[in-house]
Image (spheres, rainbow, N blue to C red):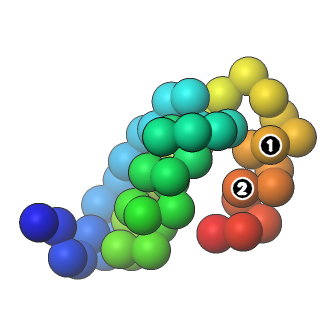
Amino acid sequence: MYSDLKGKRVLVTGASSGLGAHFVRVLAGKGAHVCAAARRLDRLEALARDC
């Protein structure tokens, strides 16, 4: 559906696991600037390194 999101900004809540983490990876892979929010900082940091 959205093949190119370069330049778009996206906020994903609940990003430390499950669907939130999945959407962070997908959206970042499509070129979006992703702001990931969650309660578990250690998992957010690991997700940021992966992306």
6 or 47: nearer the eye?
A: 47
4 or 9: nearer the eye?
A: 4
Q: Relative to 23, is 3 on the left or the right?
A: left
x, y percent for residue 6 = 31, 74
Label number found at residue 47: 2
* Outermost right residue: 42
Label number found at residue 43: 1
14 or 9: nearer the eye?
A: 14
x, y percent for residue 23 = 44, 51
**Is 21 situated above or below 49?**
above
User: Is the Cβ of the residue at disc 2 closer than 8 Å to that at disc 1?
Assistant: yes
Q: Secondary structure at mark 1?
A: helix
* Outermost front residue: 18
The residue lying at 23 percent from left, 77 percent from top is 4
Q: Relative to 15, is 23 on the left or the right?
A: left
The residue lying at 27 percent from left, 69 percent from top is 5
Q: Secondary structure at mark 2?
A: helix
Q: Amino acid at mark 1?
A: Arg
For the C terminus, which image quadrant? Answer: bottom right
**Label 1: how many Cα within 10 Å (few below 14, some 14–19, many 20+):** some
The residue lying at 88 percent from left, 40 percent from top is 42
